[in-house]
């Protein structure tokens, strides 16, 4: 069993540095995939309302027999709809997620997108602040927020997100955001940490490092995330890859390796741009 180190959030909660993501995992496959992940040693599971698999995640948690306090469950408010969000709507949606998960609380509740063109993320984060202060959610944070969005949230609501979950991989290293996160003790969490299977893992530099360490390119990339301080949430429904992705704690990248990966940063984004995303 792999022992995953924790990072400490600003409220003192412990969050595993390597988790299991279920984006694009169908509802009917989610319980089995999460079950494999929990059996392999993952204790952090990341879902979202829009993934439409919260019920499957909750079923796997219930079936695992693991104590709830040993698990770290994240879900996200889907604000990519046509409505402008109010405080009461946010609180109702949180309750709906809990019902789908079959849980009394989540460890981390994120707003999925800033949607700056709708100008309602301050209202959402203010309501999130209430959830955190009351203890109904252990911690709250953001997803896909850029520096300007974060500064405005902190300045105008007083809520400092515990986590900002962003697209981050060797081709998109997000140095400005990571520096801002460090300034405010915000944990950087990488979604699509392996580049969504869009060619990153075929990079010859990563291939060379994989051969050097007798590892897969995916394991090299995940090790890089861990050593630079990111939280990463790779996803797979293949049991062997689920196990491979957590088997990254018995080797280290040296300074030369880290520099080689740093030099891969090209600003290439595989997912949607948070400044323009407004899926209604």
Image (spheres, rainbow, N blue to C red):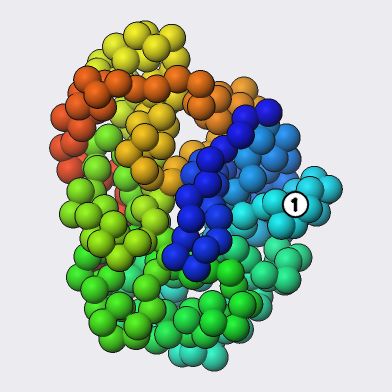
Residue 245 is situated, as x and y percent measured from the top left of the image, at: 52, 29
Task: Tell me what residue is drawn at x 24 percent, y 36 percent.
Answer: 171
Horizontal side, residue 214 vs residue 101: left or right: left
Instruction: Answer with the quarter of the image where residue 219 lies.
Output: top left
Is residue 97 something that shows in the picture? yes
Image quarter in which the N terminus is found: top right
Is residue 192 something that shows in the picture? no
Instruction: Answer with the quarter of the image where residue 227 lies.
Output: top left
Q: Which of the pair 269/69 is nearer the observer?
A: 69
Task: Tell me what residue is drawn at x 56 percent, y 43 percent.
Answer: 20
Residue 276 is situated, as x and y percent measured from the top left of the image, at: 24, 65
Horizontal side, residue 69 vs residue 129: left or right: right
Q: Is residue 163 above or below residue 1?
A: below
Horizontal side, residue 167 vs residue 36: left or right: left
Task: Tell me what residue is drawn at x 83 percent, y 48 percent.
Answer: 65
Q: Is residue 194 above or below residue 192?
A: above
Density class for disc 1 (Cα within 10 Å; few <14, some 14-19, many ≥20) is many
Horizontal side, residue 86 vs residue 179: left or right: right
Q: Which of the pair 26/3 is nearer the observer?
A: 3
Task: Tell me what residue is drawn at x 44 percent, y 65 percent.
Answer: 10
Question: In this figure, what is the number of numbered marks?
Answer: 1
Q: Is residue 83 above or below residue 105?
A: below
Q: Is residue 24 above or below residue 254?
A: below
Q: Which of the pair 31/247 is nearer the observer?
A: 247
Residue 230 is situated, as x and y percent measured from the top left of the image, at: 38, 45
Residue 196 is situated, as x and y percent measured from the top left of the image, at: 39, 37
Image quarter in which the C terminus is found: bottom left
Where does label 1 land, which residue? Answer: 61
Say what secondary structure mark 1 lies in.
Answer: helix
């Amino acid at each position: 069993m792999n022992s995953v180190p924790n990072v400490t959030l600003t409220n003192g909660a412990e969050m595993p540095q390597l988790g299991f993501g279920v984006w694009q995992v169908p509802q009917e496959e989610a319980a089995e995939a999460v079950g494999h992940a929990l059996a392999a040693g993952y204790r952090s599971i990341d879902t979202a309302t829009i993934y439409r698999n919260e019920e499957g995640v909750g079923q796997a948690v219930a079936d695992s027999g693991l104590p709830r306090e040993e698990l770290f469950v994240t879900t996200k408010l889907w604000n990519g709809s046509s409505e402008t969000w109010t405080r009461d709507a946010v609180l109702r949606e949180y309750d709906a997620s809990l019902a789908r998960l079959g849980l009394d609380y989540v460890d981390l509740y994120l707003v999925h997108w800033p949607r700056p063109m709708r100008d309602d993320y301050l209202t959402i984060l203010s309501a999130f602040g209430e959830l955190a202060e009351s203890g109904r959610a252990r911690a709250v944070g953001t997803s896909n927020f850029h520096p300007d969005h974060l500064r405005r949230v902190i300045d105008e609501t007083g809520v400092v997100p515990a986590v900002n979950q962003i697209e981050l991989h060797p081709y998109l290293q997000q140095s400005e955001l990571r520096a801002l996160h460090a300034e405010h003790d915000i944990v950087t969490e990488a979604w699509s940490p392996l580049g969504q299977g869009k060619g990153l893992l075929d990079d010859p530099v990563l291939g060379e490092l994989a051969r050097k360490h007798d590892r897969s390119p995916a394991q090299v990339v995940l090790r890089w995330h861990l050593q630079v301080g990111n939280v990463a949430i790779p996803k797979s429904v293949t049991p062997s890859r689920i196990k491979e992705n957590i088997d990254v704690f018995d080797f280290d990248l040296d300074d030369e390796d880290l520099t080689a990966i740093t030099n891969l940063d090209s600003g290439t984004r595989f997912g949607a741009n948070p400044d323009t995303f407004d899926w209604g």
